[in-house]
Image: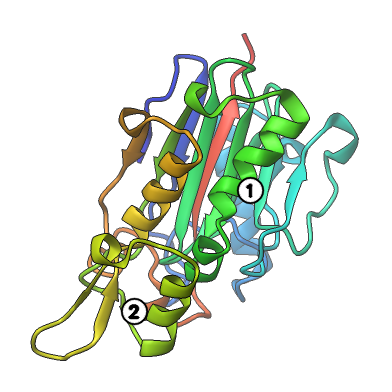
Amino acid sequence: MTYALAEHITAFSTERHCTEQAAPYDGFNITHYCGDEAEHVRRCREQLCAQLGIPDSRLIVPRQVHGVRIEEVTEQHLGVAFEDTDALITRLKGVCIGVSTADCVPLLMYDQGTGAIAAAHAGWRGTVGRIGVLTLQAMQEAYGTKADDVSCVVGPSIGPEAFEVGEEVYETFAEAGFPMNDIAYLHPATRKWHIDLWQANVWQLMQAGVQENAIQVSGVCTYMNHARFFSARRLGINSGRIFTGIMINEQ
C-alpha cells in the first residue's frame, strides 16, 4: 500500500503477500525482533531495499517498546541500531525510516516547508502518550517544522469495531484528556468499550496544528484484514510485522 504525500516522497506499508515461511510468519516481514528466522527477514529486507533502490544501511528499522522515545537519523547514525525507540525523524535523502506494527497505529509525517520526514509507532500507550505530537515537537526543535506545513498518514491498524478494551484502558484515555464521546463507544451487546485509535491520533495531530485535510487515514483494519496485513490479535504477538516507511527520494 502506498501513500501520496509529494512527488519526491516514497511512503508505504508492506503487505503480507505469500512467502514460503511457516505461519504465523508467512508473509513479507523485515522486522528482526519479532521471532522470525533471521534468513527470512534478511531476504525480505534485501527485496525491499532493491525496490527502494538503496543499500541495506539506509533502511532503518528501530526496536520499539511502546514508549515515546524519538531519535534523529543523521549520516553518523547509518548502520547503528536504534534500541528502545518508537519514532524517527530525518532530513536525509535516500534513507528509508519506518516503524513495525501488527495492529498498532503507524504514523508518517512530511514537512513540505523544511523537507523533513518522520515515522512513529502509536499503540494505545503511545497514543495516550501523544507520540504524534511529541514527534512534531522533535521536528520543530531539530528543523524548525511548522505543524500547518505537515502532511500525515495514519496507516493500517486495528479499527474501532475490533479494538475492544477494558475499563482501565478507557479510563487511561479519559484521564489523559481525550474526547471520549468522539473516540470511544460502549458496544450495546457486549457492554465493552471500543476505542478509535485512528480518530484519537487525528485529534491530537489537529490539536497540535496539523490541518484536517492534510491527514490521510487508510481506514484499513488489520484485524479484519489479517490475510493482507499482520495482526497480533489474530496471529499472536510472535508473528510478522507490517513495515510502514517513508523516504525522501534522491533527485
Q: Quadrant of residue 39?
A: bottom right
Query: Please, what is the three-letter code of the amino acid marked with disc 1?
Result: Leu
Q: Quadrant of residue 166?
A: bottom left
User: What residue is disc 1 on?
Assistant: 134
Foreground residue among 208 and 45: 208
Q: Residue at x 53, y 17 (%)?
A: 112
Foreground residue among 115 and 222: 115
Task: Assign a secondary structure to mark 1.
Answer: helix
Residue 131 placed where, x, y %? 58, 54
Which of the image's four quarters has the C terminus?
A: top right
Image vertical order of residue 167 relative to residue 21, above or below: below
User: What residue is disc 2 on?
Assistant: 234
Is residue 224 rendered to the left or right of residue 157? left
Task: Assign a secondary structure to mark 2.
Answer: helix
Which of the image's four quarters has the N terminus?
A: top left
Query: Please, what is the three-letter code of the amino acid marked with disc 2?
Result: Arg
Residue 113 placed where, x, y %? 58, 15
The Cα atoms of the two marked residues, 1 and 2, are separated by 30 Å
- How packed is label 2: few (under 14 Cα within 10 Å), some, or many (20 or more)? some
